[in-house]
Image (spheres, rainbow, N blue to C red):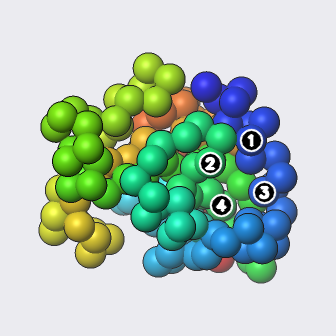
Amino acid sequence: MVRSVRESTRQFLDVNAATAAGYGAFLGCVSGPDHGAMGIHYVNLGLYADGEIDVSHPEALIYEPSGDRRRLVGVEYLVDAATWLAGHNNTPPVLEGQVFQFVGSPNRYNLPAFFELHVWAWRDNPAGAFVDWNNRVSCEAQ
């Protein structure tokens, strides 16, 4: 799966290509006190709103800040929980064998409940390619 993600997101190594394709920064750089960081999520609201999951079209691209520059480190697949569950017999999404995590509401992002799956395709994560937090990603250089 990591290889598939890399192939389909290579075009977004430059954050300007991501914004031209409809991705926009959502919130700021997300970090955790004990877990490293996630980075800055650039979300494509059209992909999020379609209620579908496709490995070649992630709903969010994750960039690590470095001053004015952004380095692509991973992606996140996202889907609204109510929309997904209504159309899929109350079962969580699965993409290439990876089960999505449920994030209830309220949450730190002030979003309705959703399912998510991180894939660290462009920055190795010692904890695993599908773990939310990556201790090799930092928000300190923004």
* Residue 18 location, quadrant: bottom right
Q: Which numbered circle lies on residue 119?
A: none
* Element class at badge 4: strand
- 10 Å crowding of disc 1: few (<14), some (14-19), many (20+): few
Mark 1 / mark 2, whichever is N-terminal: 1
Instruction: Name the kind of residue labelled 3 in the image.
Output: Phe
Find out whether the residues at labels 3 and 4 contact each other: C-beta distance under 8 Å.
no
* Element class at badge 2: loop
Instruction: Name the kind of residue labelled 4 in the image.
Output: Tyr
Q: Which numbered circle lies on residue 12?
A: 3
What is the spatial separation of the Cα atoms under label 1 and label 2, in whole angstroms?
Answer: 7 Å
Question: To which residue does mark 1 refer?
Answer: 8
Q: Is residue 56 above or below residue 99?
A: below
| Residue 141, horizontal then vertical, whole percent | 66, 71
- 10 Å crowding of disc 2: few (<14), some (14-19), many (20+): some
Q: Which numbered circle lies on residue 57?
A: 2
